[in-house]
Image (cartoon, rainbow, N blue to C red):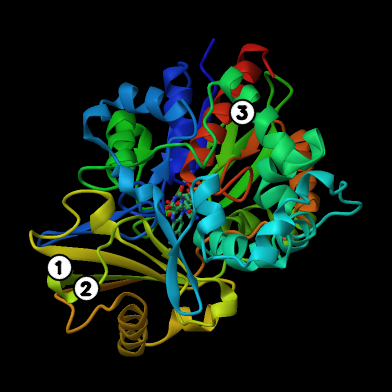
Amino acid sequence: MARPHTVIIGGGISGLTVAYWLQRGGAEVTVLERESVPGGTMRTVSDGGWLVETGPNSALETSPVFKEMFEGIGITPDRLYADAASNKRYILRNGQLHPLPMSPPAFFKSRLWSVPGKLRLLQEPFIGRATKEETVAEFVERRLGREFLDYAINPFVAGVFAGNPEELSVRHAFPKLYALEEKYGGLIKGMIGGARERRRRAEVAKDRAQMFSFSAGMKVFPDALGRFLGQAVEYDCDVRGIKVGQNGTGGGSRFTVEYSRRGTTAVIEAERVVLAVPAYVASSLLDAHAPGLAAQLREVYYPPVAEVFLGYRIDQSAHPLDGFGFLIPAVERRQILGTIWSSALFPRRAPAGHIALTTFVGGSRQPDLASLPDAELLRSVRSELGALMGVHGEPAYARINRWEKAIPQYNLGYQRLLDAIDGLEMKFPGLVICSNFRGGIAVGDCVKNGKATAQKLIEQARAGA
Ligand SMILES: Cc1cc2nc3c(=O)[nH]c(=O)nc-3n(C[C@H](O)[C@H](O)[C@H](O)COP(=O)(O)OP(=O)(O)OC[C@H]3O[C@@H](n4cnc5c(N)ncnc54)[C@H](O)[C@@H]3O)c2cc1C
Protein backbone atom coordinates (compact mmCIF):
# COMPACT_ATOMS: atom_id res chain seq x y z
CA MET A 1 0.00 0.00 0.00
CA ALA A 2 1.32 3.48 -0.86
CA ARG A 3 2.33 5.54 2.16
CA PRO A 4 -0.06 8.45 2.74
CA HIS A 5 1.60 11.69 1.77
CA THR A 6 1.47 14.53 4.30
CA VAL A 7 2.08 18.14 3.33
CA ILE A 8 3.08 20.42 6.18
CA ILE A 9 2.60 24.11 5.51
CA GLY A 10 5.16 26.13 7.47
CA GLY A 11 8.71 25.18 8.45
CA GLY A 12 8.89 26.86 11.87
CA ILE A 13 9.73 24.69 14.85
CA SER A 14 6.14 23.31 15.00
CA GLY A 15 6.03 22.20 11.37
CA LEU A 16 9.59 20.82 11.40
CA THR A 17 8.84 18.80 14.54
CA VAL A 18 5.73 17.25 12.99
CA ALA A 19 7.76 16.43 9.86
CA TYR A 20 10.61 14.91 11.89
CA TRP A 21 8.35 12.54 13.82
CA LEU A 22 6.31 11.62 10.76
CA GLN A 23 9.44 10.79 8.80
CA ARG A 24 10.82 8.76 11.71
CA GLY A 25 7.48 6.93 11.77
CA GLY A 26 7.92 5.96 8.11
CA ALA A 27 5.50 8.49 6.59
CA GLU A 28 6.15 10.44 3.42
CA VAL A 29 6.28 14.19 4.12
CA THR A 30 6.78 17.47 2.31
CA VAL A 31 7.25 20.73 4.19
CA LEU A 32 6.42 23.88 2.23
CA GLU A 33 8.15 26.89 3.76
CA ARG A 34 7.79 30.44 2.51
CA GLU A 35 11.26 31.62 3.51
CA SER A 36 14.56 30.32 2.15
CA VAL A 37 15.67 29.02 5.57
CA PRO A 38 13.98 26.84 8.21
CA GLY A 39 12.94 27.97 11.71
CA GLY A 40 10.28 30.68 11.32
CA THR A 41 10.55 32.80 14.46
CA MET A 42 13.66 30.92 15.60
CA ARG A 43 16.63 32.53 13.85
CA THR A 44 20.12 33.64 14.90
CA VAL A 45 22.40 36.18 13.26
CA SER A 46 26.20 36.02 13.74
CA ASP A 47 27.93 39.32 13.06
CA GLY A 48 31.55 40.09 13.90
CA GLY A 49 31.63 38.19 17.19
CA TRP A 50 28.10 39.17 18.24
CA LEU A 51 25.45 36.45 18.31
CA VAL A 52 21.98 37.93 17.99
CA GLU A 53 18.78 35.96 18.48
CA THR A 54 15.97 37.49 16.44
CA GLY A 55 13.27 35.39 18.16
CA PRO A 56 13.56 33.09 21.18
CA ASN A 57 16.81 33.61 23.12
CA SER A 58 16.59 30.24 24.85
CA ALA A 59 14.12 27.47 25.65
CA LEU A 60 13.22 25.54 28.77
CA GLU A 61 13.80 21.80 28.77
CA THR A 62 10.29 21.03 29.99
CA SER A 63 9.77 17.91 27.92
CA PRO A 64 11.83 14.78 27.18
CA VAL A 65 10.98 15.33 23.48
CA PHE A 66 13.87 17.79 23.22
CA LYS A 67 16.47 15.21 24.24
CA GLU A 68 14.99 12.59 21.91
CA MET A 69 15.13 15.02 18.99
CA PHE A 70 18.62 16.38 19.74
CA GLU A 71 19.96 12.84 19.83
CA GLY A 72 18.08 11.93 16.65
CA ILE A 73 19.50 14.86 14.69
CA GLY A 74 22.96 14.79 16.30
CA ILE A 75 23.05 18.18 18.05
CA THR A 76 23.34 17.05 21.69
CA PRO A 77 27.03 18.13 21.85
CA ASP A 78 26.09 21.63 20.64
CA ARG A 79 23.50 22.22 23.35
CA LEU A 80 24.47 24.68 26.07
CA TYR A 81 22.74 24.94 29.41
CA ALA A 82 22.47 28.46 30.78
CA ASP A 83 24.83 29.53 33.51
CA ALA A 84 23.45 28.52 36.95
CA ALA A 85 23.29 32.23 37.85
CA SER A 86 20.52 32.61 35.27
CA ASN A 87 17.99 31.50 37.87
CA LYS A 88 18.38 34.96 39.34
CA ARG A 89 15.87 37.33 37.75
CA TYR A 90 15.29 40.92 38.68
CA ILE A 91 12.04 42.86 38.84
CA LEU A 92 11.83 46.63 38.91
CA ARG A 93 10.15 48.35 41.84
CA ASN A 94 10.32 52.10 42.46
CA GLY A 95 13.08 52.39 39.88
CA GLN A 96 15.31 49.76 41.58
CA LEU A 97 16.04 46.21 40.40
CA HIS A 98 15.19 43.61 43.06
CA PRO A 99 16.06 39.90 42.72
CA LEU A 100 13.00 37.66 42.55
CA PRO A 101 13.30 35.57 45.73
CA MET A 102 13.89 31.86 45.13
CA SER A 103 13.46 30.52 48.69
CA PRO A 104 11.03 31.17 51.58
CA PRO A 105 13.64 33.07 53.70
CA ALA A 106 14.59 35.21 50.66
CA PHE A 107 10.89 35.85 50.06
CA PHE A 108 10.35 37.18 53.59
CA LYS A 109 13.47 39.40 53.33
CA SER A 110 12.66 40.68 49.82
CA ARG A 111 11.75 44.34 49.33
CA LEU A 112 9.80 43.50 46.19
CA TRP A 113 6.53 43.26 48.14
CA SER A 114 5.29 45.04 51.25
CA VAL A 115 4.54 43.13 54.48
CA PRO A 116 0.74 43.25 53.86
CA GLY A 117 1.41 42.05 50.28
CA LYS A 118 3.34 39.06 51.61
CA LEU A 119 0.79 38.27 54.31
CA ARG A 120 -1.93 38.27 51.65
CA LEU A 121 -0.25 35.24 50.05
CA LEU A 122 -0.87 33.23 53.21
CA GLN A 123 -4.62 33.37 52.53
CA GLU A 124 -4.18 31.50 49.23
CA PRO A 125 -5.00 27.96 50.43
CA PHE A 126 -8.34 29.20 51.82
CA ILE A 127 -9.62 30.87 48.62
CA GLY A 128 -12.36 29.02 46.72
CA ARG A 129 -12.57 28.17 43.03
CA ALA A 130 -13.53 30.66 40.27
CA THR A 131 -17.16 30.81 39.21
CA LYS A 132 -16.50 32.12 35.67
CA GLU A 133 -13.71 32.19 33.09
CA GLU A 134 -11.11 34.62 34.34
CA THR A 135 -8.30 36.67 32.92
CA VAL A 136 -4.83 36.07 34.34
CA ALA A 137 -5.20 39.32 36.29
CA GLU A 138 -8.56 38.34 37.83
CA PHE A 139 -7.28 34.89 38.78
CA VAL A 140 -4.06 36.14 40.37
CA GLU A 141 -5.62 39.09 42.16
CA ARG A 142 -8.32 36.83 43.63
CA ARG A 143 -5.89 34.14 44.78
CA LEU A 144 -2.73 36.10 45.59
CA GLY A 145 -3.63 39.77 45.85
CA ARG A 146 -3.00 42.91 43.80
CA GLU A 147 0.62 43.42 44.77
CA PHE A 148 1.64 39.96 43.62
CA LEU A 149 -0.19 40.59 40.34
CA ASP A 150 1.60 43.90 39.83
CA TYR A 151 5.11 42.90 40.89
CA ALA A 152 5.35 39.25 39.87
CA ILE A 153 2.74 38.15 37.35
CA ASN A 154 2.37 41.30 35.27
CA PRO A 155 6.11 41.46 34.42
CA PHE A 156 6.24 37.67 33.97
CA VAL A 157 3.37 37.83 31.44
CA ALA A 158 5.21 40.61 29.59
CA GLY A 159 8.29 38.37 29.49
CA VAL A 160 6.53 35.28 28.18
CA PHE A 161 3.68 36.54 25.97
CA ALA A 162 4.65 40.21 25.55
CA GLY A 163 1.08 40.21 26.79
CA ASN A 164 -1.39 41.86 29.09
CA PRO A 165 -2.72 39.88 32.09
CA GLU A 166 -5.96 41.91 31.93
CA GLU A 167 -6.75 40.27 28.56
CA LEU A 168 -5.15 36.82 28.57
CA SER A 169 -7.29 33.87 29.65
CA VAL A 170 -5.69 32.11 32.60
CA ARG A 171 -7.15 28.79 31.44
CA HIS A 172 -5.46 28.97 28.05
CA ALA A 173 -2.39 31.14 28.57
CA PHE A 174 -1.29 29.40 31.80
CA PRO A 175 -3.12 26.07 31.79
CA LYS A 176 -0.87 24.52 34.44
CA LEU A 177 -1.55 27.37 36.86
CA TYR A 178 -5.26 27.14 36.13
CA ALA A 179 -5.20 23.35 36.61
CA LEU A 180 -3.75 23.74 40.10
CA GLU A 181 -6.99 25.40 41.19
CA GLU A 182 -9.28 23.18 39.09
CA LYS A 183 -7.72 19.92 40.17
CA TYR A 184 -6.36 20.56 43.64
CA GLY A 185 -8.41 23.56 44.81
CA GLY A 186 -5.44 25.94 45.10
CA LEU A 187 -1.93 26.81 43.99
CA ILE A 188 -0.02 25.71 47.08
CA LYS A 189 -1.96 22.43 47.40
CA GLY A 190 -1.56 21.90 43.67
CA MET A 191 2.18 22.49 43.61
CA ILE A 192 2.63 19.59 46.02
CA GLY A 193 0.26 17.26 44.12
CA GLY A 194 1.49 18.42 40.68
CA ALA A 195 5.13 17.57 41.44
CA ARG A 196 4.15 13.92 41.98
CA GLU A 197 2.30 13.79 38.64
CA ARG A 198 5.14 15.36 36.68
CA ARG A 199 7.55 12.79 38.11
CA ARG A 200 5.21 10.12 36.76
CA ARG A 201 5.11 11.75 33.28
CA ALA A 202 8.89 12.48 33.28
CA GLU A 203 8.10 16.18 32.76
CA VAL A 204 9.69 19.14 34.47
CA ALA A 205 7.91 22.24 35.81
CA LYS A 206 8.79 25.44 33.98
CA ASP A 207 10.31 26.95 37.13
CA ARG A 208 12.65 23.94 37.53
CA ALA A 209 13.40 23.15 33.89
CA GLN A 210 16.90 23.89 32.64
CA MET A 211 17.29 26.71 30.18
CA PHE A 212 19.27 25.93 27.06
CA SER A 213 20.46 27.26 23.74
CA PHE A 214 23.27 26.10 21.44
CA SER A 215 26.85 27.21 20.93
CA ALA A 216 25.88 28.89 17.66
CA GLY A 217 22.46 30.04 18.93
CA MET A 218 18.88 28.79 18.69
CA LYS A 219 18.97 28.38 14.90
CA VAL A 220 21.09 25.24 15.37
CA PHE A 221 17.89 23.32 16.16
CA PRO A 222 15.78 24.21 13.08
CA ASP A 223 18.86 24.12 10.83
CA ALA A 224 19.66 20.56 11.96
CA LEU A 225 16.03 19.53 11.48
CA GLY A 226 16.13 21.04 7.99
CA ARG A 227 19.27 19.02 7.18
CA PHE A 228 17.76 15.84 8.64
CA LEU A 229 14.62 16.24 6.54
CA GLY A 230 16.70 17.07 3.44
CA GLN A 231 14.68 17.18 0.22
CA ALA A 232 11.45 16.85 2.18
CA VAL A 233 11.64 20.58 2.97
CA GLU A 234 10.96 22.86 0.04
CA TYR A 235 11.88 26.50 0.58
CA ASP A 236 10.59 29.70 -1.05
CA CYS A 237 7.13 28.11 -1.31
CA ASP A 238 4.36 30.55 -0.45
CA VAL A 239 1.20 28.50 0.02
CA ARG A 240 -1.81 30.33 -1.41
CA GLY A 241 -4.70 27.88 -1.11
CA ILE A 242 -5.96 24.41 -0.24
CA LYS A 243 -8.62 22.55 -2.22
CA VAL A 244 -10.47 19.69 -0.57
CA GLY A 245 -11.89 16.69 -2.45
CA GLN A 246 -13.01 13.17 -1.59
CA ASN A 247 -10.45 10.43 -1.13
CA GLY A 248 -11.44 7.21 -2.83
CA THR A 249 -9.42 4.96 -0.53
CA GLY A 250 -10.06 5.70 3.12
CA GLY A 251 -13.20 7.83 3.19
CA GLY A 252 -11.08 10.82 4.24
CA SER A 253 -10.33 13.92 2.19
CA ARG A 254 -7.80 14.46 -0.54
CA PHE A 255 -6.11 17.81 -0.60
CA THR A 256 -4.55 19.89 -3.32
CA VAL A 257 -2.17 22.50 -1.96
CA GLU A 258 -1.44 25.45 -4.25
CA TYR A 259 1.70 27.49 -3.83
CA SER A 260 3.87 29.95 -5.60
CA ARG A 261 7.61 29.37 -5.90
CA ARG A 262 9.84 32.11 -7.28
CA GLY A 263 7.04 33.46 -9.42
CA THR A 264 5.75 30.07 -10.63
CA THR A 265 2.51 28.52 -9.44
CA ALA A 266 2.58 24.85 -8.46
CA VAL A 267 0.29 22.29 -6.83
CA ILE A 268 0.93 19.25 -4.68
CA GLU A 269 -1.53 16.50 -3.76
CA ALA A 270 -1.73 15.04 -0.25
CA GLU A 271 -3.83 12.74 1.88
CA ARG A 272 -3.06 14.88 4.91
CA VAL A 273 -2.29 18.55 5.43
CA VAL A 274 -0.83 20.08 8.58
CA LEU A 275 -1.20 23.82 8.98
CA ALA A 276 1.85 25.00 10.93
CA VAL A 277 1.52 28.69 10.07
CA PRO A 278 0.42 31.68 12.18
CA ALA A 279 -3.33 32.11 12.78
CA TYR A 280 -3.70 34.98 10.28
CA VAL A 281 -2.16 32.83 7.52
CA ALA A 282 -4.29 29.80 8.48
CA SER A 283 -7.29 32.15 8.31
CA SER A 284 -6.73 33.01 4.64
CA LEU A 285 -6.06 29.34 3.73
CA LEU A 286 -9.27 28.18 5.43
CA ASP A 287 -11.59 30.99 4.37
CA ALA A 288 -13.22 28.98 1.56
CA HIS A 289 -13.82 25.85 3.71
CA ALA A 290 -14.57 27.17 7.19
CA PRO A 291 -15.42 30.89 7.02
CA GLY A 292 -16.50 31.02 10.69
CA LEU A 293 -13.22 29.60 11.92
CA ALA A 294 -11.30 31.77 9.44
CA ALA A 295 -12.95 34.87 10.93
CA GLN A 296 -11.97 33.80 14.44
CA LEU A 297 -8.38 33.07 13.36
CA ARG A 298 -8.17 36.55 11.85
CA GLU A 299 -9.11 38.03 15.23
CA VAL A 300 -6.25 36.41 17.16
CA TYR A 301 -4.14 39.32 18.32
CA TYR A 302 -0.39 39.24 17.69
CA PRO A 303 1.08 42.39 19.27
CA PRO A 304 4.20 43.90 17.72
CA VAL A 305 7.54 43.54 19.50
CA ALA A 306 10.91 45.14 18.79
CA GLU A 307 13.96 43.24 19.98
CA VAL A 308 16.86 45.65 20.50
CA PHE A 309 20.29 44.01 20.83
CA LEU A 310 23.03 46.25 22.18
CA GLY A 311 26.70 45.45 22.80
CA TYR A 312 28.95 47.38 25.19
CA ARG A 313 32.39 47.09 26.73
CA ILE A 314 32.12 45.45 30.16
CA ASP A 315 33.24 48.65 31.88
CA GLN A 316 30.27 50.56 30.41
CA SER A 317 27.81 48.79 32.73
CA ALA A 318 27.58 49.55 36.45
CA HIS A 319 25.57 46.35 36.93
CA PRO A 320 27.43 43.03 37.35
CA LEU A 321 24.86 41.16 35.16
CA ASP A 322 24.58 38.42 37.77
CA GLY A 323 21.51 36.69 36.39
CA PHE A 324 19.03 36.30 33.56
CA GLY A 325 18.08 39.95 33.30
CA PHE A 326 15.11 41.99 34.46
CA LEU A 327 11.42 42.47 33.82
CA ILE A 328 9.34 45.59 34.27
CA PRO A 329 5.88 45.75 35.83
CA ALA A 330 3.42 47.97 33.92
CA VAL A 331 2.84 50.08 37.05
CA GLU A 332 6.48 51.25 36.86
CA ARG A 333 5.61 53.07 33.60
CA ARG A 334 8.85 52.56 31.65
CA GLN A 335 9.48 52.44 27.90
CA ILE A 336 10.73 48.82 27.76
CA LEU A 337 9.31 45.43 28.82
CA GLY A 338 12.58 44.00 30.08
CA THR A 339 16.12 43.04 29.16
CA ILE A 340 17.91 39.71 28.89
CA TRP A 341 21.58 39.78 29.83
CA SER A 342 22.40 37.56 26.88
CA SER A 343 26.17 37.40 27.41
CA ALA A 344 25.69 36.36 31.05
CA LEU A 345 23.51 33.40 30.06
CA PHE A 346 25.58 31.69 27.39
CA PRO A 347 29.19 32.01 26.20
CA ARG A 348 30.13 33.46 22.80
CA ARG A 349 27.27 36.01 22.62
CA ALA A 350 29.71 38.95 22.56
CA PRO A 351 33.40 39.49 21.67
CA ALA A 352 35.92 39.23 24.53
CA GLY A 353 35.65 42.11 27.00
CA HIS A 354 32.08 42.93 25.96
CA ILE A 355 28.52 42.34 27.12
CA ALA A 356 25.34 41.76 25.10
CA LEU A 357 21.92 43.02 26.22
CA THR A 358 18.65 42.11 24.49
CA THR A 359 15.77 44.45 25.28
CA PHE A 360 12.11 43.94 24.37
CA VAL A 361 9.87 46.87 23.50
CA GLY A 362 6.15 47.06 22.73
CA GLY A 363 3.92 44.02 23.20
CA SER A 364 0.25 44.37 24.15
CA ARG A 365 1.27 46.84 26.84
CA GLN A 366 2.77 49.49 24.55
CA PRO A 367 2.25 48.36 20.93
CA ASP A 368 3.03 51.82 19.52
CA LEU A 369 6.55 51.84 20.96
CA ALA A 370 7.52 48.79 18.86
CA SER A 371 7.26 50.85 15.69
CA LEU A 372 9.27 53.89 16.77
CA PRO A 373 11.83 54.86 14.12
CA ASP A 374 15.23 53.21 14.67
CA ALA A 375 17.00 56.29 16.06
CA GLU A 376 14.19 57.04 18.53
CA LEU A 377 13.91 53.41 19.61
CA LEU A 378 17.67 53.21 20.26
CA ARG A 379 17.61 56.49 22.17
CA SER A 380 14.73 55.27 24.33
CA VAL A 381 16.30 51.86 25.09
CA ARG A 382 19.71 53.36 25.84
CA SER A 383 18.15 55.90 28.17
CA GLU A 384 16.26 53.13 30.05
CA LEU A 385 19.38 50.94 30.33
CA GLY A 386 21.25 53.97 31.63
CA ALA A 387 18.64 54.70 34.29
CA LEU A 388 18.06 51.09 35.38
CA MET A 389 21.49 49.46 35.04
CA GLY A 390 23.92 52.35 34.85
CA VAL A 391 24.92 51.55 31.25
CA HIS A 392 26.71 54.54 29.76
CA GLY A 393 28.41 55.67 26.57
CA GLU A 394 28.03 54.67 22.94
CA PRO A 395 27.19 51.02 22.25
CA ALA A 396 29.87 49.02 20.43
CA TYR A 397 27.14 47.24 18.48
CA ALA A 398 23.41 47.72 17.87
CA ARG A 399 20.88 45.70 15.95
CA ILE A 400 17.09 45.99 15.90
CA ASN A 401 14.78 43.19 14.95
CA ARG A 402 11.08 43.89 14.63
CA TRP A 403 8.15 41.48 14.73
CA GLU A 404 5.03 43.20 13.47
CA LYS A 405 3.01 40.21 14.66
CA ALA A 406 5.03 38.55 17.41
CA ILE A 407 3.15 36.18 19.69
CA PRO A 408 -0.50 35.01 19.60
CA GLN A 409 -2.46 36.15 22.62
CA TYR A 410 -4.68 33.50 24.18
CA ASN A 411 -7.26 36.04 25.28
CA LEU A 412 -10.48 35.53 27.23
CA GLY A 413 -12.91 33.33 25.26
CA TYR A 414 -10.11 31.42 23.48
CA GLN A 415 -11.99 28.14 23.97
CA ARG A 416 -14.41 29.14 21.17
CA LEU A 417 -11.52 29.18 18.71
CA LEU A 418 -10.15 25.86 19.97
CA ASP A 419 -13.61 24.25 19.66
CA ALA A 420 -13.90 25.56 16.10
CA ILE A 421 -10.49 24.04 15.26
CA ASP A 422 -11.66 20.67 16.66
CA GLY A 423 -14.77 21.04 14.48
CA LEU A 424 -12.64 21.67 11.37
CA GLU A 425 -10.55 18.54 12.01
CA MET A 426 -13.73 16.45 12.42
CA LYS A 427 -15.24 17.84 9.23
CA PHE A 428 -12.11 17.34 7.11
CA PRO A 429 -10.30 14.22 8.33
CA GLY A 430 -6.61 14.59 7.54
CA LEU A 431 -6.56 18.39 7.92
CA VAL A 432 -4.75 19.27 11.15
CA ILE A 433 -3.57 22.46 12.85
CA CYS A 434 -0.30 22.43 14.79
CA SER A 435 1.08 25.87 15.52
CA ASN A 436 1.90 28.07 18.47
CA PHE A 437 -1.64 29.50 18.60
CA ARG A 438 -2.85 26.10 19.82
CA GLY A 439 -1.54 24.42 22.96
CA GLY A 440 1.21 26.81 24.05
CA ILE A 441 3.64 29.36 22.64
CA ALA A 442 6.89 28.18 24.27
CA VAL A 443 9.31 26.25 22.10
CA GLY A 444 8.82 23.32 24.52
CA ASP A 445 5.06 23.39 23.87
CA CYS A 446 5.63 23.48 20.10
CA VAL A 447 7.84 20.37 20.10
CA LYS A 448 5.54 18.47 22.48
CA ASN A 449 2.50 19.29 20.35
CA GLY A 450 4.43 18.58 17.15
CA LYS A 451 5.31 15.08 18.27
CA ALA A 452 1.75 14.41 19.50
CA THR A 453 0.34 15.61 16.15
CA ALA A 454 2.66 13.29 14.21
CA GLN A 455 1.74 10.35 16.46
CA LYS A 456 -1.96 11.03 15.92
CA LEU A 457 -1.49 11.09 12.14
CA ILE A 458 0.56 7.89 12.20
CA GLU A 459 -2.13 6.13 14.25
CA GLN A 460 -4.86 7.38 11.89
CA ALA A 461 -2.86 6.08 8.91
CA ARG A 462 -2.48 2.68 10.58
CA ALA A 463 -6.22 2.58 11.27
CA GLY A 464 -6.82 3.41 7.57
CA ALA A 465 -8.63 6.66 8.35
C1 LIG B 1 10.41 37.93 19.87
C2 LIG B 1 10.05 36.55 20.35
C3 LIG B 1 10.74 36.02 21.44
C4 LIG B 1 10.42 34.73 21.89
N1 LIG B 1 11.12 34.20 22.94
C5 LIG B 1 10.89 32.92 23.33
C6 LIG B 1 11.72 32.31 24.31
O1 LIG B 1 12.68 32.91 24.81
N2 LIG B 1 11.45 31.02 24.66
C7 LIG B 1 10.44 30.31 24.09
O2 LIG B 1 10.22 29.14 24.46
N3 LIG B 1 9.63 30.87 23.14
C8 LIG B 1 9.85 32.15 22.75
N4 LIG B 1 9.08 32.71 21.76
C9 LIG B 1 7.97 31.93 21.19
C10 LIG B 1 8.44 30.88 20.18
O3 LIG B 1 9.62 31.28 19.56
C11 LIG B 1 7.37 30.65 19.11
O4 LIG B 1 6.11 30.42 19.69
C12 LIG B 1 7.71 29.46 18.21
O5 LIG B 1 9.01 29.57 17.67
C13 LIG B 1 6.66 29.39 17.09
O6 LIG B 1 6.93 28.33 16.21
P1 LIG B 1 5.86 27.94 15.10
O7 LIG B 1 6.52 26.95 14.22
O8 LIG B 1 4.57 27.53 15.75
O9 LIG B 1 5.54 29.28 14.31
P2 LIG B 1 6.51 30.18 13.40
O10 LIG B 1 7.87 30.23 13.96
O11 LIG B 1 5.77 31.46 13.22
O12 LIG B 1 6.57 29.39 12.04
C14 LIG B 1 5.59 29.50 11.03
C15 LIG B 1 6.26 29.25 9.69
O13 LIG B 1 5.28 29.30 8.66
C16 LIG B 1 5.86 29.95 7.54
N5 LIG B 1 4.77 30.47 6.69
C17 LIG B 1 3.93 31.50 6.96
N6 LIG B 1 3.07 31.66 5.95
C18 LIG B 1 3.35 30.72 5.03
C19 LIG B 1 2.78 30.36 3.77
N7 LIG B 1 1.74 31.02 3.24
N8 LIG B 1 3.35 29.32 3.08
C20 LIG B 1 4.39 28.63 3.58
N9 LIG B 1 4.95 28.93 4.77
C21 LIG B 1 4.44 29.96 5.49
C22 LIG B 1 6.73 31.04 8.15
O14 LIG B 1 7.70 31.52 7.24
C23 LIG B 1 7.32 30.30 9.35
O15 LIG B 1 8.53 29.65 9.00
C24 LIG B 1 9.38 33.99 21.26
C25 LIG B 1 8.70 34.54 20.16
C26 LIG B 1 9.04 35.80 19.70
C27 LIG B 1 8.31 36.36 18.50
Residue 240 visible in rendering:
no
Give x and y (percent) for residue 138.
Answer: 78, 62
- Badge 3 marks a residue whose secondary structure is helix
Spatial separation of the CA atoms under disc 2 and disc 3: 40 Å
Q: For the residue marked with disc 1, what is the amino acid?
A: Ile
Spatial separation of the CA atoms under disc 1 and disc 3: 40 Å
Q: Which residue is mark 2?
A: 317
Q: Measuring 49% from the left and 41% from the top, which residue is drawn there?
A: 14
Between 171 and 314, the residue placed more toward the observer is 314
Q: In the drawing, does residue 27 fall left or right of residue 283?
A: left
Q: Which residue is mark 1?
A: 314
Give x and y (percent) for residue 199.
Answer: 57, 21
Q: Measuring 68% from the left and 44% from the top, which residue is drawn there?
A: 177
The label number, if any, that marks residue 195 in the structure image: 3
Q: For the residue marked with disc 2, what is the amino acid?
A: Ser
- Badge 1 marks a residue whose secondary structure is helix
Q: Quadrant of residue 296?
A: bottom right
Between 113 and 334, the residue placed more toward the observer is 113
Give x and y (percent) for residue 417.
Answer: 75, 52
Give x and y (percent) for residue 98.
Answer: 45, 65
